Amino acid sequence: MVRYTIRGSKEYLVKKMAKILSPCIDICKFKRQGHCIGCSMTKAQKSTFKALKKKKQRAEFINTLREQQNRLGGYEAWPQAYRRRCLKKGSQDLLEPLP
């Protein structure tokens, strides 16, 4: 993402690396055997994601989470909600269509 910032009378070109957002979509109700009904993460998985600092690790976590969502079923609305959240926050959208 490229952004222009004005400081005083000078304009600077700021290149900001797009951050990978948490898969959480702010529903946070753990009713499906300890899994959130919004994103399918458990409380332990939420803590794990926060501890991941490298983009590659976060991307792999999201891919694993998508597989978990497919296994559990009932998370068809999550990709659209996550994409909307990424767009709103100016973050990187890593989602690829699953077969």
Image (cartoon, rainbow, N blue to C red):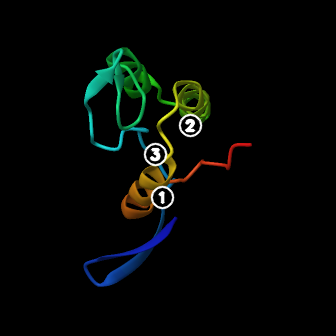
Please state if 9 lies on the left or on the right of 74 as rendered. Answer: left
Q: Quadrant of residue 98?
A: top right
Q: Where is residue 10 drawn, in percent x and y? A: 35, 81
Label 2 crowding class (10 Å Cα cut-off): few <14, some 14-19, many 20+? Answer: few
Question: Disc 2 designates what residue?
Answer: 55
Marks 2, 1: nearer the viewer: 2
Q: Closest to the observer: 29 or 46?
A: 29
Q: Residue furthest front?
A: 74
> Which amino acid lies under the numbered mark 3 shown in the image of this protein?
Trp
Marks 3, 1: nearer the viewer: 3
Task: Indicate which disc residue 16 carries.
Answer: 1
Mark 2 and mark 3: span between their CA atoms? 21 Å
Of mark 3 and mark 1, the one earlier in the sequence is 1
Residue 15 sits above or below residue 27 on the image:
below
Q: Closest to the observer: 80 or 43?
A: 80
Q: Dot 3 lies on which element? A: helix
Residue 91 sits above or below residue 25 on the image:
below
Marks 2, 3: nearer the viewer: 3
**Is the residue under label 1 in contact with that under label 2 (CB below 8 Å)?**
no
Q: Closest to the observer: 38 or 51?
A: 38
Mark 2 and mark 1: span between their CA atoms? 14 Å
> Which amino acid lies under the numbered mark 2 shown in the image of this protein?
Lys
* Residue occupying the point 58% across, 25% down: 71
Please state if 24 lies on the left or on the right of 60 as rendered. Answer: left
Please state if 72 lies on the left or on the right of 24 as rendered. Answer: right
Q: Where is residue 30 drawn, in percent x and y? A: 28, 24
